[in-house]
Amino acid sequence: MHVSQLWRYPVKSLRGEALSSAEVTTNGITGDRVVHVRGTRGPLTGRTRHGLLSLGATTGTDGVPLVEGLPWDSPSAGAMIVQRGGDDARLVADASPERFDVLNLLVATDEAVARFGHDVRRLRPNLVISGVEPGQEPYWPGMAISIGEVLIGVDSLRARCIVTTIDPDTGEQDLDVLRQIRRDFGGELALNCWVITPGTIEVGDAAELVATNERPTVYGGWIVGAPYPHATDSAD
């Protein structure tokens, strides 16, 4: 098995960027989801503001997240977020562990993605592992993925939501995508993972499934009730 794709999402719920290599820390991939969208009642995501999912986010050479090529804290980026996310939408910087929906890495396997049959970006993975035997993804929780010096724990299958129905390029919705996930995968596709041992991962690196007794100690999840901490606002 090997790493065939690496993805980072500098702004949560915006379209991500493909990487050739990534620094993986105990707080996820460096620069991943370090900005999110805040509304008057808390975080806003593509679950309810579908227009956000087709906006592009990348990372500048200085490490600053960009929205469609513009610094995240610029008035122009803020205007795009309001247009797609609503009048109360504002960009916020926060690198706390709670910014992840479940854990700080999402891993997809090529065999499951092939059966899914749609653009892998709908699943929003950080890693895609290729060379996986058919039907093996559900048996990975409780194991770990060894990639060079990096060790990634596999916690659970990811329950999928309405985000998968949004085309990341056009923003158009196809509800049959989620219906298919429920029918063919029991509603769960890709793997909630966390970093046990940090390091650097490159596309093409060999990957091996190994045993582990480690379990995650920190979960994310603002959207499912975790406390929503203070964050740095683009207008502050």
Image (cartoon, rainbow, N blue to C red):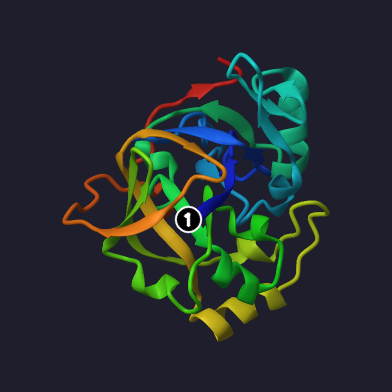
Q: Vertical placement of 191 versus 105: above or below?
A: below
Q: Is residue 140 left or right of residue 37?
A: left
- Residue 196 position within the rendered picture, expressed as x and y whole percent measured from the top left: 28, 43
Q: Residue furthest right?
A: 170
- Residue 227 position within the rendered picture, expressed as x and y whole percent measured from the top left: 33, 42
Q: Is residue 178 visible?
A: no
Res 13 quadrant in image? top right
Quadrant of the image containing the C terminus: top right
Identify which residue is drawn at 64% across, 71% down. Answer: 114
Q: Vertical placement of 146 versus 78: above or below?
A: below
Identify which residue is drawn at 43% across, 45% down. Answer: 100
Q: Vertical placement of 137 versus 50: above or below?
A: below
Identify which residue is drawn at 66% across, 20% down. Answer: 60
Q: Vertical placement of 53 versus 80: above or below?
A: below
Residue under label 1, please give it.
Answer: 107
Which element carries disc 1, helix, strand or loop?
strand
